[in-house]
Each structure stands twice: as structure tokens, then as C-alpha cells.
Amino acid sequence: MSKKIGVFVCHCGTNISATVDVEKVAEEAKKNNPGVSYTTTYKYMCSDPGQKLLRDKIKEEGLDGVVVAACSPKMHEHTFRNASKKAGMNPYHVEISNLREQCSWVHPDKPTGTEKSIDLVRMMTEKTRKDKSLNPIKVPVTKRALVIGGGIAGIQAALDIADAGHEVVMVEREASIGGHMAQLSETFPTLDCSQCIMTPKMVELAQNENIKLYTWSEIEAVDGYLGNFDVKIRKKARSVDLDLCTGCSSCWQVCPSKKIKSEFDMKLGNRTAIYIPFPQAIPSKPVIDREHCLLFKDARKKNIPPNDSKVCRKCLDVCPIAPVKAIDYSQEDEIITEKIGAIVVATGYKELDDTSMYGEYGGGKYQDVITGLQFERLASASGPTEGEIQRPSDGKVPEIIVFIQCVGSRDPAKGCSYCSKTCCMYTAKHTMLYKHKVHDGHAYVFYIDIRCAGKDYEEFWLRAVEEEGATYLRGRVSRIYKKGDKLVVLGADTLTGSVVEIEADMVVLASAMKAQDDAEKFAQKLSIQYNKDKFFSEIHPKLKPVESSSAGIFLAGTCQGPKDIPETVAQAGAAASKVLALLSADELEREPVVAKVDRLPAPIFSTCIGCFYCKRVCPYGAIAEEDIKARDGSVIKTVARVNEGLCQGCGLCAATCRSKSVELAGFNDEQVYAEINSVEFS
Amino acid sequence: MIEELRKKAEELLKNGTVKVVFGYGEGSTPERTRPVFITKPEDVNKLTWNKYCVYNLTTYLKRQETRKLGKPALILKGCDARTIIVLLKECQIKREDVYIIGVTCDGVGDPLATKCEACDVHTPLIYDDLVGEKRENKEVPFEERYAELDEYEKLGEKEKWEFWQKQFEKCIKCYACSNICPLCFCDRCIVEKNQPQWIDPSAHPRGNLSWNVTRAYHLAGRCINCEECQRVCPVDIPLNLLNKKLAKEAEKSFNYRPGYNIDDELAMSTYKEDDDQDFFK
């Protein structure tokens, strides 16, 4: 039976109607087309009255197919499909003819635009005729979340999800959770001690029974799909048994390798080869740095198993745990698979710590030219100087200190084009911390602009200038050179138009926040998109800020772009709420636009010949080999089968299949053929 | 060599390694051979070998009638054996289900077949037993291998179009080309699909064009240029010219030659970051 099709042409204000004669398009849709029983135009089809018109006409005219000629289906296909569902029609009998993006916006000439629009509408009308009713696919949901990264973003997201009653698996690649926030001294704009507010959260996470923590572990692979991910986690060999170890500290006290630069202290302090990164580490159990440990070095050199080396076994000897010691040199990496429903990516950032490209600032060669994070460690009570500001070269307390903002940031030539957003504020904070600790010291700041947009931020900065006496100079530094034990800073003050020369004791570079070194590889592992700076991309910058390009994977914190702690925590909460929404249902509904390999009665079973080109081209691993068996169990033929849960409906398999055995629901051969056939070629 | 072949076939049939031997037998005239399917050891004398053994016996791997006979041993020249590698890659046969009696070959046909002119597989690349003296497979330069395209490639776009229109006009849609092709192994060909009817089955110019172009596309990056389609075409359409051109493009773009190395990924279903992207305009 032939369908009764309604065609609704949208003006989109004047977006479409300015270059397309919409009345004529509606009129032509009806002409010579007995299937089209109703046509109309409307100013804004997506508006409430527009949708009502659609619903009413479906009922009044008894339509069983609808073409909406409007904007891209990316915009409002969902809107119109929902509207038609409300009117009692299967939503997959609605097709969108894209007159805006594909016609009116690209063709300035009205007659040509109109002609093309008529063609576009006819194509969709013909497709609609072949539309079949489709029903959403239901997939079960694993009610567990994975949080990747144990910084403040990950911790916040994990706590929010766990507090709502769901299990959370957290994976942190360092030996302890805490991330960058644990390294900071005090935080703007309130100057509360970072560790004092961070460590309670870390403890809360460790004590939460819903959270399973893997530290010193990395993501090996992510398979599966929204609601049903299989995540492979590599537990790196820690050389310490976490169940046995009590964190008594005996081992790291006796370790003879004491001069290893501490990553946590940004290389300003030392640590041992068996170590915990900082006193409040969670878990408070050590890890052996196999690269620097004497025993492992010896084993590598002699190419023998570490257990056979006798060079140094002090940590093992001193370990008080009995009868089995907590230290195990023979531990190997372990791969664990976890079933997960939704993922929060909170992998954080990396400070631009290599400033070798900035020859004018000494190219990373001057010991007393340090980065922002290094200053944080100097100012921190848990840092290498126990909070006293001492310069790295000779431990002298600097009397004059120069801060340079925008190092790496806003510098497309040598660094990154973007603004790192936090440096204006942390530099203001640094001047204050310095002043609080060195009362007669003086701080100078070179800046391009001051960007302090945030609650209480402007006031905070003003306090640094007005109450704490920091001298702000608007200009860049052209050169830093050594003169005796001083650093001479040459710069410009563009507000007075003068050249400035400051003999400083120490210089702090407000260096940029960058994406992690392995961000690109990691994104590819998760199939999520990233931008030119390797920060992970949200799917819509305004309306979907925490959703990644892969369904079920959400973003939190600085892995998505530079941001400060309040913003990170807010975003982590947002990501957690998205995860909770997803985990709140027992089943998920999926769009039924998925591929299917045909099945026919015996003796053919399927026209699929099993060449598995489809399997090779499928980007989602959605195609499996299926044996069609006789009653006695013998294999008659092996053919392809699509896993509906994994299929994203991209259609590559359908395009690749030579025998046309694969069809994509909603875009099947008959529909596409009808579309093509309706075009009049001239 | 014939004796050696017969002995080998007899042995395989007697000891039960295979149920049937696909080989060449004497034809109606001395210049002809025909395929023979030997199932009994006493029939091995029907096997022959000479320069008229032009055709590619792997096509019988896809046919129900010959499949029914059981595990086969095939007598294959170097070029034919390349088909086996493609069939293995495309999951159409299992290695243990075929026995390959490779024959070394200095070229077939009288005059010498075009496919033999730039041959670089005088000794098959895959076999279980080799009959004949082993030859070194010397590399043939790219240009030489595609020399038969030289004249054709000199034509302009319009001339090429006219050339093919004229050729395809002759097509009577007998489908001999796809029947003989060992790599046209679909149970249902796209031309047999009628909902919708992508290809007009009548011998109308439009349908002829879509049939011949689709057939060639479906062989792009797969065809091993055994020239069987061209040999069987009753109206002499130079089908291999089309196949060869596509093979050249595949090799140029993806550095891929089907049937040479079982470890190579199939060009048409493999994305590599260094793939030629020039076609994006």
C-alpha cells in the first residue's frame, strides 16, 4: 500500500526562505507525486507551534510518512522524530531534507537554490516511501564506573559516583593518588593550604567501600561500548605487596640510593629508590623505582633475574613483615580486566617544564630560574625546604624575585597559542606567599594582560598589588643573564615606555599547562577526539561540555583544557552526574540504525560468503564470525554477524560488501536506491 | 614432466591424501587442453602438461560440482597459485583443505600469452610439491609489468570513455567472465540482487556499463591477472585491460600486489596512516 506522505518546508526565519522559494518547493513536492498528500510551509518548524502543526497533521491527514525540509538532521531530526512519535507514528518514518546547510547557505542564487531544494525534497520523499518501522535497541548496563586519573578531578568524580551507591574503579598511573593539587602550597583565591583540603578527600576515597583503587597502573585497552566496556588495566610491577606492606617506612630509610631527583618535588628535592612520593601518599606504601634501584640495575647489567642479584637487598632485609616479606623483587606486570558501564577521563595536564626553547630566559640552564610548580614545592611545608623560600643554587633566601607570566602560553611561535588560564592567579598568589615568608623581599611581575575573571579573583590580584606590594610591569623580558650570583633581568615596561633592568636573586616562570605527553596515544586507545594541542575534545563546547566524542566516556579536569581547581571540581561533578544518569537505568536504549547481515532460509542461510572484508573495515569491532551449523554440529558455512550493541551505524560494512549482504537499517539499499533514482540527471 | 605429474597424482590418490586431482587433459585438437578431474589412480594417464595449459584451475574451487568431489590436489602454475594466496586471505579456503602440485613454467600459449610476458612467478610462491626444475623468480620492474597499458594510457579522458562505450556495447551479459573468475566467488552476485536492482540485467548499454565497471571494481586490489575473463569473453572485450589498470593503481597507491605474500594486509580493507591521500581534493 502506498504511503501518505506529508512534506513540511521550514523557512528557518529567512535562513532558508531568503535564497529558496519555499512555497514553490512545497507546491512541487505535491506535483506528479500521488504519494504526497499534504504539504505546507512554516516559519520555524522546530518551534513549539511548528511541532504541534506536525503532530496535528499526522493525525488529521492520517500521514504515515513525513519529510521535514529544514536544517541538518544533526540539529532537529531528533525533535521531529519525537514529535511524530507523540502523534502515534513510528519515528523512523520521518526523514529530514537538509535545505539549510546543504542548499540555502551555500547557494546565493534563488532560482538555482529553489531547483536544488525541489530535488532534495523529492529524494527524501522517495526515501520515505521505503522507510520501515524501527524500534530502539535495548542494551543492558553494567552499573560500574571507571575513573582514569587520581587527581582532584578524578577523586571528585569518583566520590560523587560512589556516594550515589555505584561501584567505581579508579586507575592512577603514579604510586599515589593526589595529582598536581597535592603538590601545590596554598590555593587562590582563599590561600588555604592545598594539602589540607586535598588529603581529606584522598582519605575519603581510600576509605570508601565502593571504590576500588589501582595505583601504579595504566589503561592497556578499552573494548566494548556504552554501558558495556571491557577495560584492560596493566598493574605495573610495584615490587611491594600492597596486602602485606604496612607502610612502616623501614625500607626507604635504609635505601642507599638517596640522590634520585624527586618528581613530586619537581626535581628540587631527592628521594630514595624505594619510596613513597610524599608523606600523605595513598596508598602509603612504597614502590621500587626499578630504573634507579641498585639491585635492578645490576640484574639488567648481568642479564639475570632480579632475585639472583646480590648487590643490595637492604630493603628486603629490613622489612619486618613475616613470614613472607612485603618486598618482592620478582613481581611482574599484571593485566586485569574490569567490566565497566561508563568512563570518566581525568588524566590531567603536564606543566611545561622544559624551557630550553626560551634562550632569553636562560634556556633552562640557570638553576635559579624555576617554573611555577617548582615555586609551589619551595613554598610548600612538605617541600624540599619545608616551606622556606630558598633559591636552588645556594639555598639563599631571595631578596628580589622576578615572576614572568605567559611562558609558553599565548606564544604560538615557541609554545602554545592558548592562554593557560591559571597563571595570572597563581603568580599573584606566589607574590603573596613570598611576601608572607620574606617580609623585606620584593616581587616584580612581568605580564601581558591580567586575566582574573572569576569569583573573588580580581580582588585577590588587587590585594597582591595594593596590600602585598608586588610591582607589576606590563611588558616582556628580553633577556636574563648571570652577573655574579645575581640574575639580571632585562625587560620593558610598556606603560611608561621605559627599559627595566632588575638584579634578581631568583626568577619564576609562569609556565604553561600542556596536555600530557602521551595524550594523543591515550585518546586513540579510547577512540576519543582531541584538539591540535592534544587536549581531549568535548562533543559540543557549550552544550555538551563533559561528553567526549565516544558515547559513555566523559571528561573532567585539565585533560580537556587548562582550568583551575574550582572549575575542575565543578566539571568533575558534572561528569559524575552524567555517569549517574547513565547508570540509573537497567537498560539503555540505542538508536536502531545498525547494520545487519542477511539471513535466509536453507540451503542458502545467508548470501554472505564469509570474506570478512566487513570485519576488517569495521572501526568498532562490531562484526563477528558466526558458524552456521547443521543438526549434527558440522559447520555448513561461516558468515558475518553484527553485534548491535557495538555497531555505531557508520555503514562501512555495507559499502564494502560485494554481494550486498549487509544492510544498514534506516539507510538500506532500497532507500538509498530510491533516493538516487529520483534525481533527474540532465 | 608429464610422467612426474602422473606419478604424483597417482600417489596422492592412492594414499588417500586427496580425493580428486584437478589437472589438464588432452583436448579435441593438439592445440587444446581441457580440465580433467581424476578421482581414480588408474585414470592418471589422462593428465597432460604442455604450453597449451593456459587456464587457471583454481576456479573449480568455488564450484559446487567440483567441491563435492572432496579434498582436491590442484596442478598450478606460478600465476594460478597466486589465486590460492588471495583465497586464503579472503577466508574462502583453508590451507589444509587443498593440496598444491606446483609446476614451474616458462610461459604458456601460442603465441605466448600476454600474462606471461612479464612473469615473475615461474616457480609458484605456494605449493606442497613442486614438479619441474625450480627457477629463480626474477623481479620484473614496475613499468615492464604494466607495459600492456602503455598504449591505452596515452588516450585522453574522452577517448577512453568512447573506447569503453564501444567495447561494452558488444557485451551480451553472458556472465562468462564472472563464471570463470576464481575470485568471483559470491553465492549471490550483486547483479542477481533485485531489491533494488542495482544493475540492469538486460544487455542494455546502461546496464552493460554498470555491470562491467562493477565487476572490475570488485576485483580492484584482488585480481591476479590470470586473464581468464578476457580469454572466455565471446565478444572479445579486453577485460584484462581494465583489471590491469586497477591493479596498477592499487600497486601505485598502496604498494600492494595481491597473491604475492600471505602476510600482506588486503589493500582494499586496510587503512594505513601512510596511505596515499592524494585523491582528497
Image: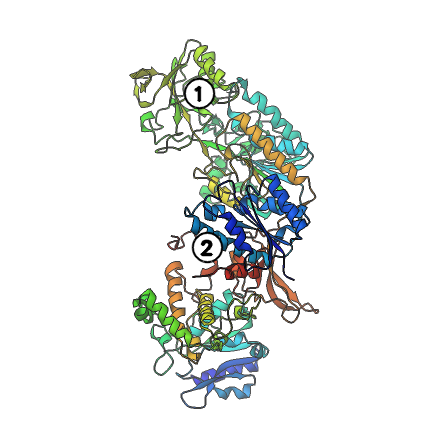
| Residue A428 in view of the camera | yes
Q: For residue A604, which quarter of the picture?
A: bottom right
Quarter of the image where the C terminus of chain A is located? bottom left
Foreground residue, A120 or A356?
A120
Q: Residue A187 at x, y = what percent? A: 52, 20
Q: Does B236 sit left or right of B73 as displayed?
A: left
Q: Does A109 sit left or right of A581 as displayed?
A: left
Q: For residue A163, which quarter of the picture?
A: top right
Q: CA distance from mark 1 to mark 2?
A: 47 Å
- Decide: is A640 above or below A379: below
Q: Residue A212 at x, y = what percent? A: 64, 36
Foreground residue, A241 or B233?
B233
- Decide: is A373 above or below B11: above
Q: Residue furthest bottom?
A: B29
Foreground residue, A45 or A319?
A45
Q: Secondary structure at mark 1?
A: helix
Q: Residue A536 at x, y = what percent? A: 50, 38
Q: Residue furthest top?
A: A440
Amino acid on which the number 2 mark rests in the picture: Tyr
Residue receiving disc 2: B271
Q: Chain of mark 2?
A: B
Q: Chain of mark 1?
A: A
Amino acid on which the number 1 mark rests in the picture: Thr
Report the label total.
2
Residue receiving disc 1: A427
